[in-house]
Image (tube, grey):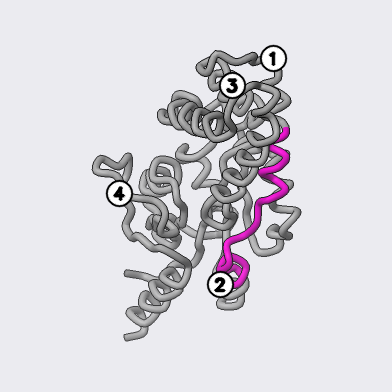
Amino acid sequence: MTAPKAILFDLDDTLLDMVSAMQGSWQEVCAEVAPRLGCEAAALRETIRRESAIFWADEEAVAEYRVRPLDSRTHVVRLSLLSMGLDDSGAEDIARRSLRGYLDRLAPFDDSMETLESLRAQGYRLGMVTNGSSDTQREKIARWNLEPYFDEIVIESEFGRGKPDPGVFRQALAGTGAGPDEAWMVGDNLYADIGGARGVGVHSVWIHRERLEFPDDPPAHPHRRIGHFDELHAALDAARAGESG
């Protein structure tokens, strides 16, 4: 395996702990609104979780909602309330509160900032490829001052297309000055990150953070699986050692 010149990163649930922020926000909002809706907070939370999983199951079919975070949340909340026989007139307000709570809670994983610092110091060119709306993704990037680490940042709503579209990865490669065989892509989403990277010939690294299970019938197979970034560093070290050996 040849050591890469550039490393591309997904943002949510790769560098930033989206799941924990999402869970905390929904738990708080459900606890606040359940009494006036006349339901149990736990039941509301579970219904929203179920409806969200159903809604996002076919990522290609609902791709337009990736750049409309408030609309997608409102849709899921409305479906959840209606399925419970509850008044759905406050769906948008609930969605808005949950979105704000999620963004406020979002933080990098413990190993993210150190990894970016280390890779930059070692001379790697770095790119970010993230789906979603410019407003929310730029807020995250600015809050954690991530932009200086990256030679290229490709955001779905700014670029006009999202992962796994090949154009997204080609733009990131061009910005980092690397060819497909000179780059690795690190991400948690098998469909968008791994499938997209493999589609353009980039070495794909699936990060599961020890909370994702590899499915029996994945949309794409990664070249490498890692739990945390220490395994990425080890793989890069091994690739460099192989070149010099």
Relative image position of residue 137 (x, y in whole percent): 67, 44
Q: Label 1, label 2: how many angstroms apart (C-alpha)? A: 49 Å
Mark 1 or 2, which is nearer the eye?
1
The answer to whether marks 3 and 4 mark residues whose Cβ atoms lie closer than 8 Å is: no
Question: Which numbered circle lies on residue 119?
Answer: 2
> Relative to 47, is 137 above or below?
below
SS class, disc 4: loop
Disc number placed over residue 89 in the picture, else none: 1
User: In the image, is 148 to the left or to the right of 20?
Assistant: right
Report the residue at 47% width, 37% height from top: 165
Give the residue number, with chain letter if any, for mark 3.
75
User: Gap between marks 3 and 4, in whole Å?
Assistant: 31 Å
Residue that numbered label 4 is attached to: 221
- Circles 1 and 2: CB distance less than 8 Å? no
Give amino acid for label 3.
Answer: His
Q: Residue at x 34, y 50 (%)?
A: 213
Answer with left or right where residue 88 lies relative to residue 192. right
